[in-house]
Structure formats: structure tokens, C-alpha cells
Image: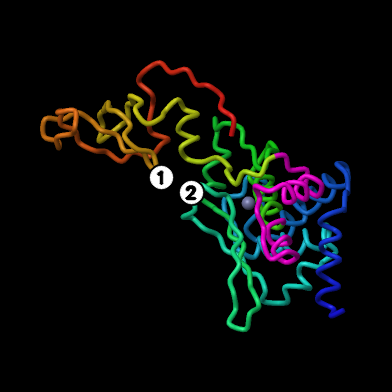
Amino acid sequence: MPVRDVKKQALAHILLTRDPGVTRIRKRTQSIGRRLLDTSTHIREPNFTAIDPGDLSFLFAAYDARFMDGICGQLLGPDGVTFRLSSRMTRAGGKTTRFRRPDGGARYEIAVATSILFDGFGAGDPNVTVCGLPCRHRLEALQRLFEHELVHLAEWLCWDESHCARSRFQDIASRLFLHRAHTHELITRTERAASLGITVGSRVTFPYRGQLLQGRVNRITKRATVLVEDPEGERWSDGRRYVRYYVPLAQLRPSDPVVVSEQER
Ligand SMILES: [Zn+2]
């Protein structure tokens, strides 16, 4: 059998059977986190404010060595996987993509969403859960996200397909990394706004050039679109005139009393 197939089989065996147990998994992942803090030039504290693709590369090598005997790296070769940070991904916390090469081979890219990572963990933010596990700080969130993407990559390598909604993926992620959910969502901006009691339709106040304006939230993306009644504004379907303001979520305050209900992610 060609060496490559032997390695694939060995990786598949690990993915389908290895069961390190809670204690060993926690020890290993915490040690990886500490080593990243010790060696990275950007990640210097658990709630780091800067990150570099090199940090993802470090995580890949460390996780592959500790959890998969380094076989992913051996199968991929030196340029088989690249790492990217994305500030544009706003719903998924991470993404693994496979690119076909002209010669029929494949290369992979693991991307991590910085916007979502950096949005969470502010003062007063709701608790952050990644892959069903509560995270105390950004580093834990980053590791959980990365573990999820690593399972995708390993599945691709063994079976030429990977789906986190399927039971094989979930079984691997729970045995190797204790994941309890397969959602890609970290804390999204919509949830962030919702946790403040603000959703589409909420009445809000916000500061604008020294005064406090009141309006209704029309849309939530990176900012909220708030419609403020104004005789000079454009006419809307309800017959009234509004001016649109784009307001950072942090500046909004609900102006109606709101009951915030805890929703399952
Ligand atoms: Zn996934």
C-alpha cells in the first residue's frame, strides 16, 4: 500500500477511535494555550487584542502533534494548508476551504473570523459559548474554533468530505475535544444587540452631535440602522418621514422597558 494511504488509514483510525478523556484533553489544550501565550508576538494575554496568521499556524502544528500524531501535517506537506484571518465573516467563527489543484491534489485554507472574536468578551457582554463550551476569554474561544476547523480538515483528508451537521463529525469533535455543539457561531452582532435588549423594531435612543435622538431599529449588521422621525426625511411605507442613522451597537440604549430572555444558541 502506498505510504500516503497508510497514513490516511492511521489518521482515520485516530479520528474514529481515539478517546483521550476529559483530564488529558484539558491538560493538553491548556498547555497549547499557555505555549501560544509564551511564544506569540501578538497573543500576549488571554483577552488578546491582536492576532497573526502565524498564531493559527502554531495552533495547527501543536494540535496536530498532540492529538493526531502529526499525521495531518505529513499528509498536507509544507504548503498544503494556509491560514487566514477574516474581518468580513460576520456569522461563522471559522471556515475551512478546500481548493482543487490542477494536478488533482488539494490544498486547504483555515480562516478564523477576527471580527466575531474581538466583538465578544467586552465588559458586560453575555457569556460566550463556542462549540457548546463556555469560554472565559478570547484565547479559549479561539482554541475551540480552531479545534472545530481542525476536525473539518482531518475529515477532508481521510474521507474527501466533511460535514459538521453529521454524526461522524460530532462524534470526533466530542471524543477529541469535548465539543457539545457543532455551531460555528461565536457571539454574533445580532445576538450582541439582542443581549442588550435591542432587536429589529426596538425603540432606542443614541447620542448624535450632542443631542439624544430617539428612533426605531430597522436593521442590524455591523451597525444598527435606526430610523428617526424627521419632517425632512424620506417617506416610508407607513406614510411617515424618517432619516436613517447608522449607529454603533454600543451606543444604543433601549428606550422601552425590555425583558431579555435567554435564548438557546
Ligand atoms: Zn463546521
Report whether 161 appears left or right of 255: right
Which residue is identified by label 2?
A: 90
**Which image quarter holds the N terminus?**
bottom right
Element on which disc 2 rests: loop
Report whether 116 appears left or right of 248: right
Element on which disc 1 rests: loop
Residue at the image point whose x is 38% and y is 26% from the top: 253
Image disc number at residue 114: none
| Residue 137 falls in image quadrant | top right
Mark 2–mark 1 distance (CA, rounded to whole Å):
8 Å
Rendered view: 256 above or below 168: above
Which residue is identified by label 1?
A: 222
Give the mark nearer the N terminus: 2 vs 1: 2
**Which image quarter holds the C terminus?**
top right
Q: Position of residue 85 (x, y in %)?
A: 55, 60
Q: Position of residue 117 (x, y in %)?
A: 57, 47
Q: Of circles 2 and 1, which is in front?
A: 2
Q: Position of residue 105 (x, y in %)?
A: 66, 78
Magenta portion: prevailing SS class: helix
Q: Is residue 83 magenta?
A: no
Q: Identity of the amino acid at label 1?
A: Lys
Residue at the image point whose x is 78% and y is 62% from the top: 64
| Residue 26 falls in image quadrant | top right
| Residue 183 falls in image quadrant | top right
Asked if marks 2 and 1 touch (Cβ < 8 Å), the reply is yes
Q: Identity of the amino acid at label 2?
A: Thr
Q: Is residue 153 magenta?
A: yes
Rendered view: 220 above or below 17: above
Residue at the image point whose x is 75% and y is 65% from the top: 158
Q: Is mark 1 within 8 Å of ligand 1?
A: no
The stretch of residues the image draws in magenta is 151-180
